[in-house]
Image: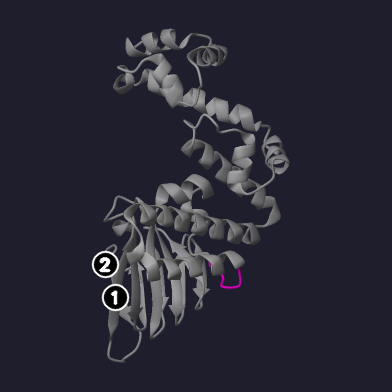
Amino acid sequence: MLERLVPIEIERLDDRPFACKMEFASVGPLRMKRLTQGALRSEMMPNAARHRDGGGTVATIFLLAGALTCQQDGRESVQQPGDIVVLDRRHAVVTSSAGSQALFLKLPRERLEGILGPSRLYTSLTMGADLASTILVTNFFHDLIRVRRQLTPDAADRMALIGADLIVANIAERLARAVPRPLHGTVVVQRAKAYVEDHLADLTLDPPQLAAAVGVSLRRLQELFHERDQHISDWIWGRRLEVAAKRLCDPGFAHLSIGVLAYGSGFGSQPHFSKRFKDRFSVTPREYRQAALIGAP
């Protein structure tokens, strides 16, 4: 199911005449392909990783007919019709049965990993057809393909974003079921921290919004951070300060005022930024920048 996407090695698994049919469609930024093919073993080699688009996308496969076996990141899974699976642009092996048919689409890596964390957490993990979220996602994309030509460009862009978010929710539900309870908290915290990294400049980002984004209650998220001797607000402000400090040291940002840097790092005002910065680094942002740009330690 990975051909035309990255260089792979392909091996036929039976002696039947080989046939393959590919159909393409697009909705806004989403590029989709429906592929029908014979029994194959497809292996993406390590040196082929992130070949075509610099690794900017992650593959999502909706199995429509036949069966698939996927191996990636030390995980092996089997997909039946109605199941969904995600694969990244790293070493992977996909085995398809004769007459298998799948809908393949590429999702922005940033959108998935910004909420769910590194793709290694959920590659080759089956989102089964028994999950309510899988049914919702599948029906949404089937309908989206059917009406795509009736959508205005703006509507198509919005529908593409909704589809991506539905897939994120589907993966999140599957992760919640798959991860053992002791490890589940670690995964939630990783996803929360990834979301913070992706939304540092959002002035409205706060613990309640973060808890909603990762699908747990605020109380539960606070408990998970406390178990790691951390506080949610402290983590958010700490990361904002670290990002701001890095930019103050970067000559590429030297043309920007401290106020602009503060705002871009998630601070609503320069005085607030200056106070927190001095509390953390014992110098003002201006002094920190001057010392860094003249090469002082």
> In the picture, residue 236 is in which quadrant?
top right
Instruction: Identify residue type, mark 1.
Output: Met
Q: Earlier in the sequence, mark 1 or mark 2?
A: 2
Toward the viewer: 50 or 131?
131
Q: How far apart are marks 1 and 2 (CA)?
A: 10 Å
| Mark 2 crowd level (few <14, some 14–19, many ≥20, 10 Å Cα) | few
* Residue lying at 61% horizontally and 72% vertically, measured from the top left: 130
Verify whether residue 130 appears in magenta: yes
Q: Residue furthest bottom?
A: 16
Q: Where is residue 6 in the image (x, y as percent from the top left)?
A: 28, 62
**Can residue 148 be seen?**
yes
Q: What stretch is highlighted in magenta?
A: 126-131
Residue 35 in the figure: left or right of residue 162: left
Toward the viewer: 31 or 149?
149
Verify whether residue 33 appears in magenta: no
- Say which residue label 2 marks: 4
Quarter of the image where the C terminus is located: top left
Residue 93 in the figure: left or right of residue 6: right
* Residue lying at 26% horizontally and 64% vertically, measured from the top left: 7
